[in-house]
Image (cartoon, rainbow, N blue to C red):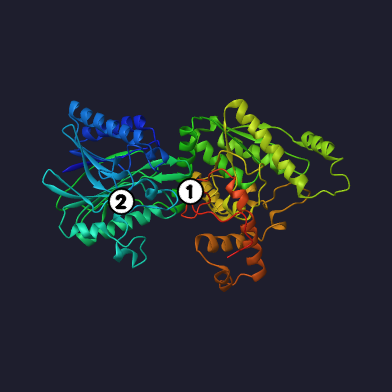
Amino acid sequence: MKIGLLQCNLICNDVTHNKKTILEAVRKAHAAGAELCVTSELALCGCPGTDLLLRKAFADYCLAVLEEIAETLVKEKLPPLLVGAPISNPVPQGKPLHNCGVFLRDGRVMVISRKVLLATDGTHDDQVYFEPGVACGVLQFNGWRFCVTVGEDVWNDRGFWKGRRDFDADPVEEFMGGGADAIINLTAVPYFMGQPKLHRQVLSWMASKYRVPVIAVNQVGGMDSAVYPGGSMLVNAAGALCMEAALFEEDVRVVELEKDIKLSTTRQEEREAENWQALVTGARDFVRKSGFSRVVLGLSGGIDSALVAAVAAEAVGPENVLGVLMPSPYSSKGSVDDSRALAANLGIQTTLVPIEKAMSAYAEMLAEPFKGKGQDTTEENIQSRIRCNILMAFSNKLGCMLLNTGNKSEAAVGYSTLYGDSGGALCVIGDLYKYQVYRLSEWLNQKHGRALIPQAIIDKEPSAELRPGQKDSDSLPPYEVLDEILSAYIDGGRDINGLLSLGFAPETVRRVLNMYRKAEFKRRQSPPALHLTRHAFGQFGYMPVATTVSM
């Protein structure tokens, strides 16, 4: 039997757009011979779920649209569709909705499966909106018996995780006791580093364990901070990957289920390639779905703004990117020259707006109130805030979205100016540590076979250039040390003793953790960052703002 895997780029809450997108994908799969089509999780309303799901009128509207799709399938003689959608809970107890796999056939809307294991991972807060189901669903179609699962329902096998599971139950194991010919998974797994490989491993394990093919359809595209990579796939009963849809692109694939599925090879994307695609996809969709077509950012001549400019040029087209150069009396010659060289390589526009006159005006205005007080970080931060005002002026005047250029290392320790360089609508590289920014920039140059990001930018010592001779290392531990500590603390879950056991100097560990604690108030007010890990700032767990404790 031929099954169409509909890997669609959906818009959260825009049911009308999603209906059109899904139907177009069904038509494409039908033309390729599909007898049954399958979408991703909550495809009708898009993932992640939002508070619109709490409104009965929205759930009723979703059901009405499902009925419209079912009628269209019959009218156009299209194949039946297994689609992810929110459906009202038929009993008065519990949450009012289920996260469902819904079968549309012969003009009817049939609920096949209700998601059992509800995620609470920061990106998806299923438990806020949905009542859990009690078991996987069964779909009997064209002589096949399918185990229909939604999202995390296939991600909790005790053997794969070796006891380190998020849930006690394993709905697939419970269902497969009664047998099935194949497993279908409607899912919306957001990207994190290594996720595509892990997704293959999970599904391969399930297929091998139950000796049945496994089909998974994943959402693709950016949705606020989250990026969904796609990579929908078919794994045969031996656990071999037979087909994998494109990563970070819409894709419709038709696969054929047989008793003996032929093995095929698949590319193993390098992590840097995956991260690059995630950033480009996330930035493109954040800008487009927010109603913008152009972006603006400050170009400092540093590595962070260079990488963000490269992402932006790929995401929205170089003709839609404006880089603003804002040198001060403390800026090096390379601040302007290197930025212009970068812009020429990328093909983006630039404009020069020196800030010396604004700095002088602030100094004059504040001379009397600050009389007798020497210069300190106050004057440095004013420079950063002047630049943000200029960037926002361009954003307002030209209708461009302002992109933030901060990285995860800076956000972690508060090495930024609130209402200055922390401003913007989207923090593109906010989930990359400084060393990862360098690594991705070098990979990008290798990919293009030339110094797309000028080597002078990569080689120069990081500096905010807010005072003569300033270097980041004046205020921070060396990035190679800082990033190791932060990674072990944030991503690895180490406490102070765990960090000390890794050999870091006690005074450095305490200094870094103290900066991390004190910077929470800045992180709360920063723009959303595209998520590349399970420990991105923003939706994933807050620290208290008012606390003196570092753990």
Q: Nearer the observer, disc 1 or disc 2?
A: 2
The circle drawn on residue 19 is none
**Residue 261 appears in the figure:** no
Report the quarter where the C terminus lies: bottom right
Residue holding disc 1: 531
Residue holding disc 2: 132
The structure residue drawn at horizontal position 68% and vertical position 35%, both measured from the top left corner, is 389
- Label 2's element? loop
The structure residue drawn at horizontal position 20% and vertical position 57%, both measured from the top left corner, is 175
Residue 344 position within the rendered picture, expressed as x and y whole percent measured from the top left = 60, 35
Q: Which mark is first along the chain, 2 or 1?
A: 2
Residue 271 position within the rendered picture, expressed as x and y whole percent measured from the top left = 44, 53
Q: Label 1 is placed on what type of residue?
A: His
Instruction: Choose top left, top right, bottom left or bottom right for residue 498.
Output: bottom right
Q: CA distance from mark 1 to mark 2?
A: 26 Å
* Classed neighbour count for the residue bearing mark 1: other residues with Cα under 10 Å, few (<14), some (14–19), many (≥20): many
Tell me if residue 104 comes above or below residue 495 in the rendering: above
- Label 1's element? loop
* Classed neighbour count for the residue bearing mark 2: other residues with Cα under 10 Å, few (<14), some (14–19), many (≥20): many
Tell me if residue 510 comes above or below residue 340 in the rendering: below
**Which residue occupies the foreground of this view, 60 or 436?**
60
